[in-house]
Amino acid sequence: MNKDVLVMIPGPTPVVESICQEMGRTVQAFGDPRFVADYKSLIDDLGALYNCSGVTFPLAGTGTLAMEMAIANTTKRGDNVLIVSNGFFGDRFIDICQRKGLNVDVLSAEWGTFVTPEEIDRKLSEKDYAAMTVTHVDTSTAVVAPIAEIGEVIKKYPNTVYILDGVAATAGEYADVDGMGIDVMFTASQKAFGVSPGMFILWAGQKALERRKTLGVIPEYFVDFDKWIPVMENPAKYFATPAVNLIWAMKESVRIIKEEGLKERAARHRKNADAIVKALESIGFKPLANADCRASTLTVAIYPEGVDDAKFRSTMYAEGVVCANALAAYFGKAFRLGHMGNITENQIVVGLSAVERSLKACGIDVEMGKAVGVYLSEIRK
Ligand SMILES: *Cc1c(COP(=O)(O)O)cnc(C)c1O
């Protein structure tokens, strides 16, 4: 039997009916004037929404490809790169950069904490860095980075391109590309945009575009800004086939985001996250991320003493909710609960109720309805 399982992993996130319908439409030729107009309006809307005066690239691929695109277009072999890492996804840039022959320096935070703007400032002053990578929300720790403050620091370093991985943040946490001094930002369709996997969006500001011009021919082909800029300016042009139905789905997602408002959407995420943390704490969980850097898009919750991770997560699944395992040193000790995008309060109630039942199945004495009650009273405050 095919049963509905609510996705509460940190992506894919729940996809609402109106977005599903766009994915199910009869396909059009990528040169069809109707599709060309749709693609153009998506590109323009995304640029305006995130205040990016450069070029916005909504393309086929995943968040990891966007990471590669960011590095490919702003650095060349032998350049120095600073990687600011608050967890697993921050570290992913190390491999990407080393394979490209970059000299990598890493500033890492202990899991659950963040690298401060002061530490970044000190490190940037040591040598000339071509680029710096920051992860807005690291999905392994649920730590959010202070991206605006980091944007202030980077103003002192005009040669350093500020690359922001917004994959688990953008459209949940607030961001403003030009306003925060971000030179490259990117996200993927399956996270807070609430679309199925298969697309990423990359915003490139003026500084990043200027940098690309200094690099000449780059080794990477599909992700080369120069290949895509003419298409982004005029989507009637062809470079590689656009993901037609996902572009429509993304367009519907942007319509929903604009209707809600970017700041209002961020406020909803914040309120939900704080209420979820209180709810989970009320039944014995502890959030991994410190209170001063807790993301609003997902929670990494450390189990109370004596809970078997595999049993907890398999019970969650049997109860109709899928959550994610924790990573690295926290594997087995915590689970990850995504609550970003178009997820509703009703769905969160279902998720928390499954958490209560799964905890009980693991032998913990839980009062049924406790976490749900805390969530509901917090969210109404
Ligand atoms: C999910 C995620 C990625 C990777 O995205 P994929 O679409 O899985 O390639 C990168 N960075 C962060 C912060 C993520 O959460």
Image (cartoon, rainbow, N blue to C red):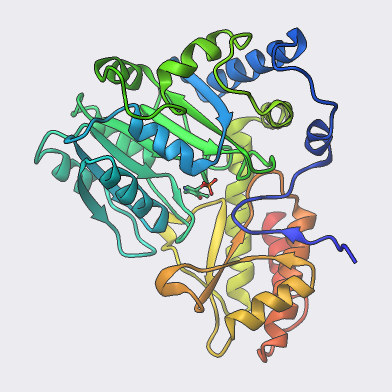
In screen coordinates, is 45 left or right of 348? left
Q: Position of 154 compared to 140: left or right?
A: left
Q: Position of residue 158 (x, y in %)?
A: 20, 24
Q: Nearer the viewer, residue 271 or 139?
A: 139
Residue 195: tell me if it is visible. yes
Q: Name above or below for residue 61 compared with residue 155.
A: below
Query: Which quadrant of the figure has residue 224?
Result: top left
Q: Quadrant of residue 58?
A: top right
Q: Nearer the viewer, residue 379 or 207?
A: 207
Residue under the point 47% across and 67% down: 327
Residue 241 lies in quadrant: top right
- 15 left or right, relative to 120: right
The foreground one among 239 and 156 is 239
Residue depicted at 24% across the width and 52% down the height: 107
Q: State whether residue 266 is above or below residue 59.
A: below
Residue 273 picture location, percent across and down: 59, 56
Q: Position of residue 118 (x, y in %)?
A: 21, 46
Q: Residue at x 64, y 54 (%)?
A: 339
x and y percent of residue 42 in the render? 64, 20
- Up-down: is 216 above or below 354? above
Q: Is residue 25 above or below residue 51?
A: below
